[in-house]
Every structure is written in structure tokens, then in C-alpha cells.
Amino acid sequence: MERIATTQTRLTLGVMTLSAALVAPGAAIAQEATPTYSKDVAPIFREKCEACHRPGYIAPMSLQTYSESRPWARSIKNRVETQQMPPWHIDQSVGIQSFQNDRSLSREQRNTIIRWVDGGAPQGNPADMPPAAVFADDDVWNFADLYGGPPDLVIKSTPYTMLALTQDHWWKPEVPTGLTEDRWIRAIEIRPTTVAGRKITHHALARLQQEDEDLGAASDVGAGLLMEWAVGKQGEIMREGSGKLIKAGSSIVWDIHYSSAGEEVTDTVELGLYFYPKGQEPKHRQVLSAFSSLEGGSDNLSIPPNTVTATERFHVLKQNGRIENFQPHMHLRGKGMQITAVLPDGTNRVLSRVSNFSFNWHNNYVYDDDAAPLLPKGTVIAVKSWYDNTSANRANPDPDQWVGYGDRTVDEMGHAWVNVTYMDDEDFQAAVAERAERTATTDEDGE
Ligand code: HEC
């Protein structure tokens, strides 16, 4: 689809250049090239915006029709041009660029929207409108068909009441899983329980809390995040042959970000877990690590007033592993984070960078199957974070404050949540060989 669109645009531009030579150039370009809402822009909104920008969901306005979108044209151009919307803050100039959950706009799509606004945001012919978008059903468990029934275990957060008008709140109840035996998780779904809950649930993290000695493969590890829910993301299926181990006596620590919706809403968020059947446990365990960026540890973080400050910390992989995702965590002064792998042969490989971090959006960037880096043991993971405590940072509540480490949003943090699937030498070599073979075949297909 996208490729066809590209070719058409190039063709049109070619024609334009010809006519531009004959008539006043500016006028000709503006007239002939202006995309219309119905034909060019609505398909992009359907695909990349409506999951949130539709009635009853987290975004402040719907973008499903021309009359709903037109009044926001200027704001849309601004947010799209500065790449704040859709909320996807990966730096597209460096590092891995293929993700399972990519919701960014292509350069082509960005240009189309900007040119549409610059050209007066015309509607065009309503007959050109694309069919309505189809969204995953919010009221069913989406993997139930795949696994032949609803989740094996459903855990609910304790109810929370969000007032009609108030600041954003973070709700962090701990709820026991009630499990009396260890199980392996193969898929996870999370969802706000009611329709009203969707208006206030910005995102929800479910963290696993359990006694666990068998995690020594990297430096800072915890039992880990099970999954983050955010609008447009219904669930997560573990990569083949891998899973998460959830233990007897474990509990879920929720971290739910609520925004007010103009009406009082009480809701819960529920987590559905699908287990591998007994006897079919996966070979590889995914472990979530918090790779800190804070040199010398948390106590050392010191961000003086009116400065930009950077810090970096190194972690050595004690076992071979596949890096599954990158989820930077900082607070209001957080500006950017980069994760780099320094391979045993000294090669430096930037995996990912976010350079316009926004505390509002705890995006989890999940690498595609063929892009998730396979790193041998002895690889050094370098995590760097930088903070803008000046007035240039619009999220900064007070540039005259000294900022140190802490839980409050006015304090700071610095770590990347990263799932690592650890493998012994034999499995690791096999994974590398299999990857090489698969990607070589794709190349021949012209990809
Ligand atoms: C994952 C959910 C999500 C997606 C996808 C998304 N938005 Fe948003 N959008 C929001 C939320 C929530 C806000 C309000 C909070 C904020 O600004 O971050 C917002 C705010 C905005 C605003 C600012 C509105 C104002 O008050 O001025 C614009 C404009 C906008 N979005 C346009 C878009 C466009 C265009 C797309 C698609 C290309 C898009 N958004 C995709 C959730 C989303």
C-alpha cells in the first residue's frame, strides 16, 4: 500500500514540476498537490489516530469525521510536525526501526497531513472516504479463540474513583494472584473493565512481585513487568519457545495512570493470563530487567537548577540473550535515553534512542522478531539518559529546583525496562544461525 502511494506521489510531483515551469510555481504546487481529507488524510487517521481519538476513549477529541477534525487542523499540524502525535518517540535517525507495535507515521504520511493543513484542510469528495476502521472488541478476551477459552487466570486491580476534574493520578494497589503452584505464561491481556473506564485509563502497568533466586543472568533484575496496557494494545503473546514464569504466592503490583474525563468514573483494570499447558513449558525464560542509567546508583543522581545533565551506566550480560524491547523510564525533566550494546569485539551498536521523551507516554517499543538483537554474553549494555532542567523543557514544573532521585514525578529516575530472553551457548548459536538464514531469504525476496 505504502509503496504504491509513494510512486503516485512521485508521479504527481513530476507532473507538477512540468506545469510549475509554465505557470507561477507556488500557486501551481499548492493547487495541484493539496491532499484532501476524504481521500488522503482519513485513511491515515483511521490507521494511526482513531484508536485513541474516537468517542469514549482517552484522547480529548474524536478525529473520525471531517467536521470533527477540521477545527483541530492547526493543532494537528503542530503535533504531527514535532512528532508528538501519534505518541511514539523513538528517534528515527538511529538504531533499530522495526517494531511489533509501531504506531508512528511514515515521513510520507507526515508530509501528507502537513500539506493538507497548509493547503487549507479541504474535505474533498466524501465518496472517497475509506471504510470505517475496525477495532479489536473491547468486551471480549481477544486470545480466547486462539487458546480455546478465556484466560486461565484473571486478576483485577482494586477499584479506583477518578473525580470529574482533577490532576492525573497514579494508582498502585498490590493484589495477590492466589496461585499455589508455579506456571509459565504464554500470553497476556490487560483491559479496563468497563467502557467508562476507557475514558480515564491512560495506561496500566502490571508488575510481578515474587520470591525468585534464579534471576542472576544480568545485573539489575527483578521478577518483572508482565505487561503494559495502553490504548490500542490489547495483548501480548510471548515469542516462540519462551515465556514468563509466575510463581506460587506471587502478587501483581499495579501502576495505573488515570486522567480525568469530565465525569466521575469508578473502575478497575483486569489482567488475563494464558498459561502453557503443564508438560509443555517453554525452554527459555523472559526476564524483565531495569537497566539503570544512573552512574554510581540512584543516590548519585544530581540535576542542578537550570542545567542539562547527562548520566550513563554500564551492565555486563553474564549470559547470551535476546533483547525484546526498550521502555525508557524517566520523569518530568527526562529528555532522552539511549541504549547501546558494546559487543565483545568492541563494536558499538546503538539499539534505540528516544530524544523527545514525554512523561505522559510510557511507550514500550517492542522489537520485531527479526530485529530483536541477539547479544553474546560479555556484551556491555550502556544506558545513557539526559535531563533538561531548564525553562526550555515545557514539562518542567520549576527550573529553579535542584532535582534528585525519587518516586514523585517532580523527582527523577533513569532506567530502561528491558525484557531479556536468556539462552545457553548452543541455543544462542542456533538462534543466530536461524536468524541469518531467515533474513537472507527475505533479502532475496527483495525486501
Ligand atoms: C495512543 C493514543 C493516541 C494516538 C494513537 C494518537 N493520539 Fe493524539 N492525543 C492523545 C491524548 C491522550 C491526547 C491528550 C494528551 C496529550 O496531549 O498528550 C492527544 C492530543 C492530541 C492533540 C492535541 C489536542 C489539543 O488539546 O490541542 C492533537 C492535535 C492530536 N492528539 C492529534 C493526533 C493525531 C493527528 C494522531 C494520529 C496521527 C494522534 N493524535 C494519535 C492520544 C493519542
Image (cartoon, rainbow, N blue to C red):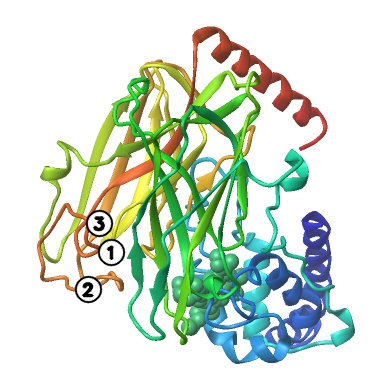
Q: Is residue 225 left or right of residue 19?
A: left
Residue at the location (53% across, 71% down)? 197
Q: How far apart are marks 3 and 2 (CA)?
A: 13 Å
Question: Which mark is nearer the camera, 1 or 3?
Answer: 1
Q: Nearer the viewer, residue 384 or 87?
A: 87
Please identify the quarter of the rendering in which residue 222 is found: top left
Q: Does the residue labelled 1 lie within 8 Å of ligand 1?
A: no
The residue at which mark 2 appears reads as 397
Tell me the SS state at disc 2: loop
Residue denoted by label 1: 332
Q: Mark 3 points at which residue?
A: 387
Q: Position of residue 225 (x, y in %)?
A: 43, 42
Q: Which residue is drawn at 34% across and 57% down?
A: 172
Circles 2 and 1 in contact, beta carbons < 8 Å: yes
Q: Distance between the residues labelled 2 and 1?
A: 8 Å
Q: From what the image shows, is residue 183 above or below residue 337?
A: above
Image height check: is 361 above or below 206?
A: below
Quadrant where the N terminus lies? bottom right
Which badge, 3 or 2, comes first in the chain's sequence? 3
Are the residues tagged 3 and 2 within 8 Å (C-beta)? no
Q: How crowded is mark 3: few (under 14 residues within 10 Å), some or many (20 or more)?
A: many
Q: Residue furthest top?
A: 426
Q: Earlier in the sequence, mark 2 or mark 1?
A: 1
Q: Which of 159 and 85 is in front in this view?
A: 159
What is the x, y in percent for residue 121? 68, 87
- Amino acid type at circle 1 is Leu
